[in-house]
Amino acid sequence: MNADNSEVLCDTFFLKPIVDDACKAGKEFPAPNFKYKPITNSQIEWAIAQLGPYKVPGADGIANVVFMQCMGLLVPHLGLIYRVIFMLKTYPKQWKESNMVVLR
């Protein structure tokens, strides 16, 4: 009985990874709904302002409050990084991964 409950709980909270086949050659995609515009520093500032300051940090271990308190120093560099990433049409593999922490 405990084994069954444990398995149900595990299946509920720890979902199996989804295999991403969107990049397979020959796949047809719909036309874009909008024209791409490079991200602006004000958009990054807005996103940082929306963060909860004391949420659990991501894999990098940097707390949101650090981004909020250092926004003036970080945003010019983050803006440049994001614009270059989109210009080069690349996306760091580490940014595609995330972990969800489930708290009781």
Image: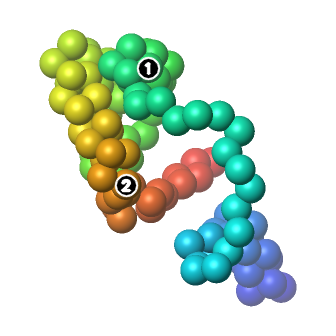
Amino acid at pointer 2 = Lys
Between circles 2 and 1, the one closer to the viewer is: 2
Find numbered disc 1 in the image and state the secondary structure of the residue it sits on.
helix
Q: Report the number of numbered marks.
A: 2
Asked if residue 65 is positioned above or below residue 42 in the image, the reply reads below
Where is residue 55 shown, x and y percent of the image?
Answer: 45, 33
- For the point 67% across and 74% down, which residue is it? 27
Where is residue 59 shown, x and y percent of the image?
Answer: 34, 53
Q: Which mark is residue 89?
A: 2
Question: CA separation, marks 2 and 1?
Answer: 20 Å
Find numbered disc 2 in the image and state the secondary structure of the residue it sits on.
loop
Q: Which mark is residue 63?
A: none
The residue indicated by pointer 1 is 43
Q: Nearer the viewer, residue 8 or 62?
A: 62
Which numbered disc flags the more N-terminal residue, 2 or 1? 1
- For the point 21% across and 13% down, which residue is it? 72
Q: Residues within 10 Å of mark 2 (few under 14, many from 20)?
A: few
Amino acid at pointer 1 = Gln
Q: Nearer the viewer, residue 69 or 2?
A: 69
Tell whether label 1 touches label 2 (CB within 8 Å).
no
